[in-house]
Amino acid sequence: MTMTLLENHPEKNIIRAQLRQNILLKDLSEADRAELETHLVIVDGNKGEFLLHQGVREMEQYFILDGILKRVVSNPEGKEMILRFADENDMETSYAALRLGTPTPYGIVCVTKARVASLPLKEWIAFLNRHAETKELFEFLVMRGMSEIMAHTITLHLLDAAGRVHRFIRKHPELEDRIPSKELASYLNLSAETLSRLRKRGKI
């Protein structure tokens, strides 16, 4: 994993253009964006690398530039549950944990090779406190993400295997062909063999 300050990055102009597409940052003024960019570090992670480990208190705010991330919970035996995926122009955060004063309850892992812009979560919150409209949007996105995770968890119990796959394709058509089958099967609480069998039978 490599980390470079945005202002020192050889691709900083491309990265700045990507940041303008981010759901949270696209409506910032040039002055506000310039202020934020002084805090940003560009992180390049490989498939399977952790950006954030479960149980830590040093938390970051991530703006996804390239690739796909997953939010995961693991038990002491190493069994993993994927809570959500996020791709370009989206973000990842541990905001709720910071506000509650708890360690982060999940890890954030690169599903594919990925590039993110990050800054310490406390610095991001200080920025939000100076920018009310961005803070309102951010808090809405955090709550929407929590709601989506809850809905997904419920469907794991209520829908059969084919139903779970259909729901994912309906909700996230942009991710269907980008997530490795093993990762998608894990997210849907299926075996990779079951997912493959459903595809071969034309059930999905």
Image (cartoon, helix red, strand yellow):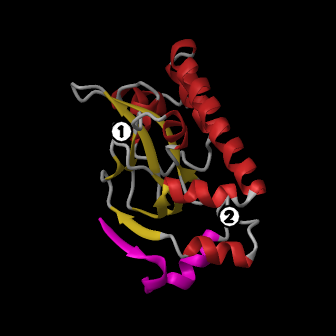
Q: Is residue 77 left or right of residue 26?
A: left
Element under disc 1: helix
Q: Is residue 176 above or below residue 149?
A: below
Q: Which mark is residue 147?
A: none
Mark earlier in primary sequence (1, 2): 2
Measured as percent of width and height from the top left, residue 183 is found at 39, 39
Q: Which residue is painted at 43% across and 82% down in the image? A: 9
* Quadrant of image for the C terminus: top right
Task: Quickly name the residue at label 2.
Answer: 25
Q: Residue at x 70, y 52 (%)?
A: 135
Front residue (pair 60, 131): 131
Residue 154 or 62: which is nearer the viewer? 62
Residue 104 position, x and y percent, is 41, 38
Q: CA distance from mark 1 to mark 2?
A: 32 Å
Q: Furthest-top residue in view? A: 158
Tell me if residue 27 comes above or below residue 58 in the rendering: below
Q: Which residue is mark 1?
A: 182
Q: Quadrant of the N terminus?
A: bottom left
Q: Measuring from the top left, give residue 113's x and y in whole percent.
A: 38, 61
> Residue drawn 61% across and 69% down?
19
Q: Which residues are magenta?
A: 1-19
Quarter assignment of residue 80: top left
In the image, is residue 4 above or below residue 157? below
